[in-house]
Amino acid sequence: MILGDLLPAIAGSLIVSCQAGPDHPLRDAPTIARMARAAVLGGATAVRCGGVGGLADIRAVAAAVDVPIIGLTKRGTSGVFITPTVHDAVQVLDAGAHIVATDGTRRPRPDGAGLTATVDAVHAAGGLVMADVATLADAVAAVGAGADLIATTLSGYTPDSPPGPGPDLDLIAALRTALPATPIIAEGRYHQPAQVRAALDAGALAVVVGTAITDPAWITASFAARTDRPHHS
C-alpha cells in the first residue's frame, strides 16, 4: 500500500481494533472476523487486528473486510512485545496486513535489531509501518527510523510515560507540532465519542478505538457499575 493512497481513505475517521485476549469468550479467529465486519458496517475505515490471535486473526479479517488492515503480533506482556522482531513484521504482512503496527519506543528489541531494520523489511515487501510510541522522543526517533505513521498506543504504558485515566491528548498536540508532516494516529484509552472528536481536533489523522466498541464484557461492566449490583455473582 502507498501512503498517499492510505491517507485519504482514513483521514478524519474511526479505526476499530478487533482483538480479544487468550481467555476471552470472543477468542477465536472467525469471531474476530465477524467483529471486524460489524465494525466496518458501522463506519470503521480500517481495522487493527492480530495481537494474541496473531496471524490467524489477520488472515481471517483480511478475508472478511475490504478496508486497510493494521496487523500486529504480541509476544509476552512486558517490554517490547508488539510485533517485536523483523521476522514478526514480515509475517504480519504475509498474513494480509497493509500496515504493520510495531513497538516504536526506544527500548531494546528482542532480536537485537533496530526499528530501522523492521521498517526496511516492511517497505521492501510493499507495506507501511505504524510505530506505536509512548512519548514525543519515541516518535521523533521512530520517524528518523523511517516509520510512516505514528500512533500514541503506548502512552501511559512505559516507565517514562506516566499513566492517565483517559487518552493522552497532550501528546497528540505535541506530535502535531513537532512532526507536522507525519500522520498521527490517536490510540489508547479512547472510551467515549467525545474523546474521538477531541483527538481529531488536537491534530490526529484518525482515531483507534478497541475495548469500548468490541469488548462486550467491558461495556457491560461500564453499565453495571452504575447499578446496585455492579459485580457478577
Image (cartoon, rainbow, N blue to C red):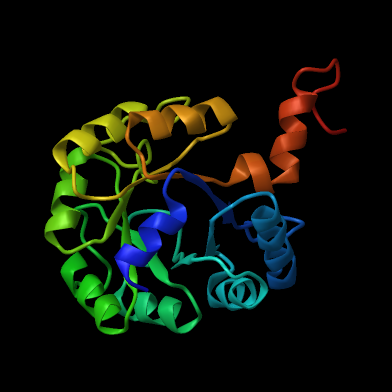
Q: Position of residue 43 (x, y in %)?
A: 63, 50
Q: Position of residue 158 (x, y in %)?
A: 32, 42
205 displayed left or right of 86: right
Quarter of the figure with the C terminus: top right
Q: Position of residue 225 (x, y in %)?
A: 75, 22
Q: Residue at x 18, y 34 (%)?
A: 177
23 displayed left or right of 147: right
Quarter assignment of residue 18: bottom right
76 displayed left or right of 162: right
State the count of labels.
Answer: 0
Q: Residue at x 43, y 72 (%)?
A: 98
In this orientation, does residue 99 appear? yes
Task: Answer above or below: position of 101 versus 61.
Answer: above
Q: Residue at x 48, y 30 (%)?
A: 197
Query: In the depicted view, which residue is nearer to us: 74 or 70?
Result: 70
Quarter of the figure with the N terminus: bottom left
Task: Answer above or below: position of 215 versus 203.
Answer: below
Q: Position of residue 111 (x, y in %)?
A: 25, 74
Quarter assignment of residue 157: top left
Quarter assignment of residue 27: bottom right
Query: In the depicted view, which residue is nearer to us: 203 or 93?
Result: 203
Query: In the depicted view, which residue is nearer to us: 157 or 215?
Result: 215
In this orientation, does residue 192 appear? no
Q: Residue at x 77, y 35 (%)?
A: 220
